[in-house]
Image: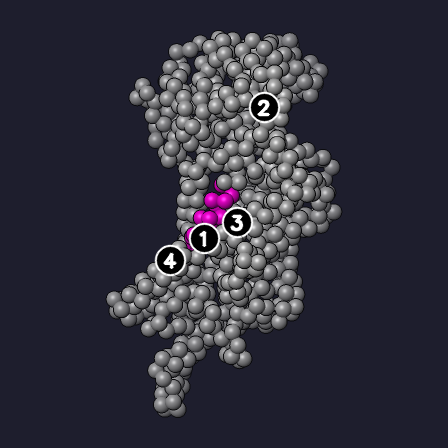
Amino acid sequence: MKADIRVALVGNPNTGKSTLFNVLTGLNQKIGNFPGVTVEKKVGYCQLPDGRKAEVIDLPGTYSIYPKSQDESIVFSVLADSSNPHRPDLVVVILDASNLKRNLLLYSQVADLKIPVIVALNMMDMAKKADISINVDLLAERLGVPVVPISARKVNGIEQLKEAISYANKFALQEDSIDVNTIAPQLVEAIGDEMHIDNPYLALQLAHQHETLKFLTPEQSDRIEELEHQYSFNSQKAQGMETIARYAFINDLLYDTVTKPVTAHEENLSNRIDKVLTHKIFGFVIFLGILLFMFQAIFSWSAYPMSLIADGFVWVQDNLHHILPAGPLANLLIDGVIAGLSGVMVFIPQIAILFAFISILEDTGYMSRVTFMMDKLMRKVGLNGKSVVPLIGGFACAVPSIMSTRTIENWKDRMITIMVTPLVTCSARLPVYTLLIALVVPNKNIWWVFNMQGLALTGMYVFSLVSAVLVAWVFKYILKGKERGYFIMELPVYRMPRWKNVVLSMYDRSKAFVLQAGKVIIAVSVILWVLASYGPGKKFDQIDKQYAQTQYTQHMSADSLSRTIASAKLENSYAGVMGHVIEPVIKPLGFDWKIGIALITSFAAREVFVGTMATMYSVNGSAEKMQSVYEKMHQAKNPQTGQPVFTLAVAFSLMMFYAFAMQCASTMAVVYRETKNWRWPAVQFAYMTVLAYAASFVTYHLLR
């Protein structure tokens, strides 16, 4: 999609930059990666009042153009590299109107790069509530750039911002915030001459960052290094001088343009709430209570829609059996593809509810408090507070959570976080847990409030967090690193969640889950159906001959005989042979050969377990009586003992296996991509598989 102007959004974290991006672009946006790196790139398009189309790039949030992580380094690379395909024609710097002093540091740096700038003065409603008065016209005059007051959450001032973007090329370039030549005049001039740069601040930044800038050739980087030695350049000292000069400029600017009430120092509502929610004792109790409520809701609120979806799939399968002519193709579609898909689709309501809660916790600002509270605990096990973001994010999916570890500057902290994040219960485990819990845990209330199934699910989630922390503590002594990790995080003020964003998050995440899982499920279901429907040699013919004898046909009902033949064929199929090969290994865990097949297939993705069981029991089932996957597994009997296959011991043994095992090809791929070494995913796979087997073995023998 060709655009007439390219606009980059730049700002500190928690200034509403992503909210503004969503307001400007709506659904007309796409997500990818910046070339050559794994940093997420969000690009969208919006129509301007003058009829032109603008391409909007949401750059990662940063406090300064001096990067402390890979995400932050992208900002300077995009703005400074004239050959970068994403270099903007215009930068919109988003400032938090209630905290201008902190935000203006980044603005002054971006402005001095001499790219046309517009200031979006966001959260004006919050500034007004705090009785902060801003002289917008004077601020614009002093900065030499357009300043547009907006409230992205309330969609106020957006049209005025679009108009400012339309007329951006009519404005002169902004004045310098500071005199860069006073910091390192000879070096700046030498780099400018050498690199043909007429912007002194860009030349200074090349001196600071040349070793990490990919748009410089090795020869150029070496030459800058030579010039630094020649002029005795001290990067840390120069950065300190620059920061002092910038804050002198900012203080003078704010003195003239911003008026704060005398009572501004008094604690605000957020601080009063934090005294309770981040309390060293009550804070953790409240967090546990919120988790408990979440998982109670996942069971109770989703029951009716899940029942509708399950009944819908049974109805479709039942009708297709009557409509389609009998044969392998019909069986493949009904007992393979549709049966497999039903095992995942039925859990959409639970996935949607989980993501809704996560979105609300993030939107209100509470998730930042959880990160803050966990910092002290994390440090004791070799991590820091920033590790909590991937760990909590792991409740949704380990893939983006592992990618988010790039914000952790310390190598050792980052590697430990990557190694333990897959232990946190992700949404792919949710269908497995809820199905197995529903099979063996009574649907009863304790003290009239707590549902036993909800408590069991909460226990699995808490157990996963505890496991991740304990394993991190072990890795603390295995991995060696000399760097010291620091935790710097801003706690945003509490806000009401944006319900439109919550609904969009539920829809997008559920859609992504279904599409990603659906592709794997269909492929695995087709392969499984073939493996379960055909066998080696002439075993199927021998089974047909055996059960055609009068001793079977005269003493067994037609339905019972049909189920017996299907069961015998399944056991002698290719899938059955595979299952029996691994059965001696998994029998000590309480698993039979059918569960063994599900364990193998779900190494591609955990949620495939449910689809596999649905396919296996459909092949073994009766065409006249279609059932949901829950009913099939509930009625499954052990042929040797006649007892149910899924007892309390077996179900919890299975959950322990899935709690620890690395059953996600996508996670292993992203670990390799982030570490650039196959050793790390190999170690991760090995230690998690050993833990899974040990935990499952102990659980089964304790509960049997």
Residue kind at label 1, given as amino acid type:
Trp
Residue kind at label 2, given as amino acid type:
Ser
Q: Residues within 10 Å of mark 4 (few under 14, many from 20)?
A: some
Question: Are dots 3 and 2 in contact, CB under 8 Å?
Answer: no
Q: Splitting the image into 4 quarters, where does residue 235 fall?
A: top right
Residue found 29% across the figure and 65% down from its top: 320
Range covered by the magenta-colored residues: 344-359
Q: Is residue 539 above or below residue 425?
A: below
Residue 518 picture location, percent across and down:
41, 54
Q: Nearer the viewer, residue 454 or 610?
A: 454
Question: Are dots 1 and 2 in contact, CB under 8 Å?
Answer: no
Which comes before the other along the chain, label 1 or label 2?
2
- The residue that disc 3 covers is 294
Residue kind at label 4, given as amino acid type:
Ile
Residue 464 picture location, percent across and down:
61, 52
Inspect the magenta stretch and tell me whether residue 356 lies in it. yes
In the picture, which quadrant includes the C terminus?
Answer: bottom right
Closest to the camera, between mark 3 and mark 2, is: 3
Q: Residues within 10 Å of mark 3 (few under 14, many from 20)?
A: some
**One can see residue 280 in this view:** yes
The label on residue 64 is 2
Residue kind at label 3, given as amino acid type:
Met
